Amino acid sequence: ALQAERSSLLHRPPVSPAAAKQGANNPIVGAHEAELGSGTGKHALWEILDDASLGFWDWNIPTETEYVSPALKRMLGQKDNERSSTPWAWRHLVFKEDQPQLQAAFEQHVKSHGSDPYSCEIRMRHQDGSTVWVRRVGRVIEWTNGAPVRMVGLHIDVSQGKRAEQALHES
Protein backbone atom coordinates (compact mmCIF):
# COMPACT_ATOMS: atom_id res chain seq x y z
CA ALA A 1 0.00 0.00 0.00
CA LEU A 2 2.82 2.38 0.87
CA GLN A 3 4.57 1.62 -2.43
CA ALA A 4 1.33 2.32 -4.29
CA GLU A 5 1.02 5.68 -2.47
CA ARG A 6 4.61 6.56 -3.39
CA SER A 7 3.96 5.55 -6.99
CA SER A 8 0.84 7.70 -7.18
CA LEU A 9 2.77 10.60 -5.67
CA LEU A 10 5.23 10.50 -8.53
CA HIS A 11 2.51 10.75 -11.17
CA ARG A 12 0.61 13.69 -9.71
CA PRO A 13 0.86 17.04 -11.47
CA PRO A 14 3.18 19.69 -10.03
CA VAL A 15 1.82 21.97 -7.37
CA SER A 16 1.50 25.62 -8.29
CA PRO A 17 3.91 27.96 -6.43
CA ALA A 18 0.95 29.70 -4.79
CA ALA A 19 -0.48 26.42 -3.51
CA ALA A 20 2.93 25.15 -2.42
CA LYS A 21 3.51 28.37 -0.51
CA GLN A 22 0.47 27.59 1.59
CA GLY A 23 1.14 23.84 1.60
CA ALA A 24 -2.26 23.28 0.00
CA ASN A 25 -2.60 20.20 -2.17
CA ASN A 26 1.12 19.53 -1.80
CA PRO A 27 1.52 15.86 -2.74
CA ILE A 28 4.78 15.52 -0.84
CA VAL A 29 3.32 16.86 2.39
CA GLY A 30 0.41 14.44 1.98
CA ALA A 31 2.80 11.57 1.31
CA HIS A 32 4.79 12.39 4.44
CA GLU A 33 1.63 12.34 6.50
CA ALA A 34 0.64 9.00 4.96
CA GLU A 35 4.11 7.47 5.40
CA LEU A 36 4.51 8.60 8.98
CA GLY A 37 0.97 7.69 9.86
CA SER A 38 -0.99 9.49 12.46
CA GLY A 39 -0.57 9.86 16.17
CA THR A 40 2.43 10.27 18.37
CA GLY A 41 4.97 8.59 16.08
CA LYS A 42 4.60 11.25 13.40
CA HIS A 43 4.66 14.08 15.88
CA ALA A 44 7.65 12.62 17.75
CA LEU A 45 9.74 12.44 14.57
CA TRP A 46 8.96 16.04 13.61
CA GLU A 47 9.66 17.19 17.19
CA ILE A 48 13.02 15.40 17.29
CA LEU A 49 14.11 16.95 14.01
CA ASP A 50 12.82 20.33 15.14
CA ASP A 51 14.45 20.14 18.60
CA ALA A 52 17.77 19.24 16.99
CA SER A 53 17.44 22.21 14.61
CA LEU A 54 17.73 19.87 11.67
CA GLY A 55 16.05 21.09 8.52
CA PHE A 56 14.47 18.26 6.54
CA TRP A 57 13.64 18.34 2.83
CA ASP A 58 12.06 15.89 0.42
CA TRP A 59 12.37 16.66 -3.28
CA ASN A 60 10.29 15.09 -6.06
CA ILE A 61 12.73 15.76 -8.88
CA PRO A 62 10.51 15.27 -11.98
CA THR A 63 7.70 17.48 -10.69
CA GLU A 64 10.00 20.03 -8.99
CA THR A 65 7.92 19.87 -5.81
CA GLU A 66 9.59 19.84 -2.45
CA TYR A 67 8.64 19.53 1.18
CA VAL A 68 10.72 21.88 3.34
CA SER A 69 10.35 21.46 7.10
CA PRO A 70 9.50 24.37 9.38
CA ALA A 71 12.87 23.90 11.12
CA LEU A 72 14.71 24.44 7.82
CA LYS A 73 12.68 27.55 7.13
CA ARG A 74 13.41 28.92 10.61
CA MET A 75 17.11 28.17 10.14
CA LEU A 76 17.03 30.70 7.30
CA GLY A 77 14.78 33.20 9.06
CA GLN A 78 11.64 32.30 7.14
CA LYS A 79 8.15 31.74 8.50
CA ASP A 80 6.52 28.44 7.65
CA ASN A 81 4.14 29.95 5.07
CA GLU A 82 6.50 32.66 3.85
CA ARG A 83 8.31 30.94 0.99
CA SER A 84 7.20 28.50 -1.65
CA SER A 85 8.28 24.91 -1.04
CA THR A 86 9.84 24.50 -4.45
CA PRO A 87 13.53 23.92 -5.10
CA TRP A 88 13.88 27.07 -7.20
CA ALA A 89 12.48 29.17 -4.35
CA TRP A 90 15.37 28.07 -2.12
CA ARG A 91 18.31 27.75 -4.54
CA HIS A 92 18.72 31.51 -4.87
CA LEU A 93 19.58 31.65 -1.14
CA VAL A 94 22.76 29.63 -1.81
CA PHE A 95 25.83 31.82 -2.32
CA LYS A 96 26.66 31.99 -6.02
CA GLU A 97 30.22 30.80 -5.32
CA ASP A 98 28.89 27.65 -3.60
CA GLN A 99 26.39 26.64 -6.28
CA PRO A 100 28.94 24.72 -8.42
CA GLN A 101 29.92 22.64 -5.38
CA LEU A 102 26.26 21.94 -4.62
CA GLN A 103 25.61 20.87 -8.21
CA ALA A 104 28.78 18.76 -8.38
CA ALA A 105 27.84 16.89 -5.18
CA PHE A 106 24.39 16.14 -6.62
CA GLU A 107 25.78 15.04 -9.99
CA GLN A 108 28.38 12.75 -8.37
CA HIS A 109 25.74 11.18 -6.15
CA VAL A 110 23.51 10.53 -9.17
CA LYS A 111 26.40 9.34 -11.36
CA SER A 112 27.34 6.78 -8.68
CA HIS A 113 23.66 5.76 -8.38
CA GLY A 114 23.85 6.68 -4.70
CA SER A 115 27.11 4.88 -3.87
CA ASP A 116 28.88 8.18 -3.28
CA PRO A 117 27.15 10.09 -0.49
CA TYR A 118 25.55 13.43 -1.19
CA SER A 119 27.19 15.85 1.22
CA CYS A 120 28.54 19.36 1.00
CA GLU A 121 28.95 22.50 3.07
CA ILE A 122 27.46 25.63 1.59
CA ARG A 123 26.60 29.15 2.62
CA MET A 124 23.04 30.40 2.48
CA ARG A 125 21.58 33.84 3.07
CA HIS A 126 19.43 34.29 6.15
CA GLN A 127 16.37 36.56 5.87
CA ASP A 128 18.24 39.17 7.96
CA GLY A 129 21.17 39.19 5.49
CA SER A 130 23.56 37.15 7.64
CA THR A 131 25.32 34.01 6.46
CA VAL A 132 24.19 30.56 7.54
CA TRP A 133 26.72 27.79 6.99
CA VAL A 134 24.86 24.58 6.19
CA ARG A 135 26.06 21.02 5.94
CA ARG A 136 23.70 19.47 3.42
CA VAL A 137 23.40 15.68 3.36
CA GLY A 138 20.95 13.55 1.43
CA ARG A 139 20.23 10.52 -0.67
CA VAL A 140 18.22 9.68 -3.74
CA ILE A 141 15.72 7.13 -2.48
CA GLU A 142 13.76 6.45 -5.67
CA TRP A 143 15.00 5.83 -9.19
CA THR A 144 13.20 5.13 -12.47
CA ASN A 145 15.19 3.68 -15.36
CA GLY A 146 18.41 4.93 -13.76
CA ALA A 147 17.12 8.49 -13.33
CA PRO A 148 16.67 10.06 -9.90
CA VAL A 149 13.03 10.57 -8.91
CA ARG A 150 12.98 11.38 -5.22
CA MET A 151 15.69 12.69 -2.90
CA VAL A 152 15.55 13.39 0.83
CA GLY A 153 18.01 15.10 3.09
CA LEU A 154 18.89 17.36 5.98
CA HIS A 155 20.31 20.81 6.43
CA ILE A 156 22.50 21.04 9.52
CA ASP A 157 23.43 24.53 10.71
CA VAL A 158 27.21 24.49 11.24
CA SER A 159 27.56 28.29 11.51
CA GLN A 160 28.73 28.27 15.12
CA GLY A 161 31.57 25.87 14.33
CA LYS A 162 32.55 27.90 11.27
CA ARG A 163 32.66 31.12 13.35
CA ALA A 164 34.84 29.42 15.97
CA GLU A 165 37.12 28.11 13.23
CA GLN A 166 37.40 31.58 11.73
CA ALA A 167 38.19 33.12 15.14
CA LEU A 168 41.02 30.60 15.62
CA HIS A 169 42.53 31.49 12.25
CA GLU A 170 42.32 35.20 13.01
CA SER A 171 44.08 34.89 16.39
Image (cartoon, rainbow, N blue to C red):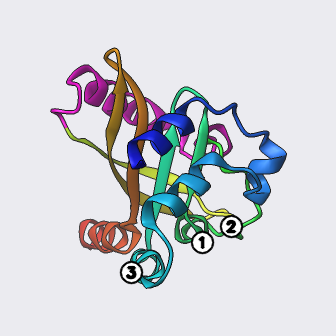
List the single residue furthest toward the front: 1
Q: Main secondary structure of the magenta part?
A: helix
Look at mark 3 in the image and give the residue it sits on.
Answer: 48
The disc at residue 78 is 2
Q: Secondary structure at mark 3?
A: helix
Count of numbered tags:
3
* In this rendering, position of residue 115 left or right of residue 106: left
Picture coordinates of residue 38 (x, y %)?
50, 74
The disc at residue 74 is 1
Q: Residue at x 73, y 40 (%)?
A: 15
Quarter location, residue 52:
bottom left
Q: Amino acid at mark 1?
A: Arg
Circle 1/circle 2 CB separation < 8 Å: yes
List the single residue furthest toward the top: 145
Residue 108 lies in the magenta-colored region? yes
Q: CA distance from mark 3 to mark 2?
A: 20 Å
Q: Residues within 10 Å of mark 3 (few under 14, many from 20)?
A: few
Q: Amino acid at mark 2?
A: Gln
Picture coordinates of residue 42 (x, y %)?
45, 75
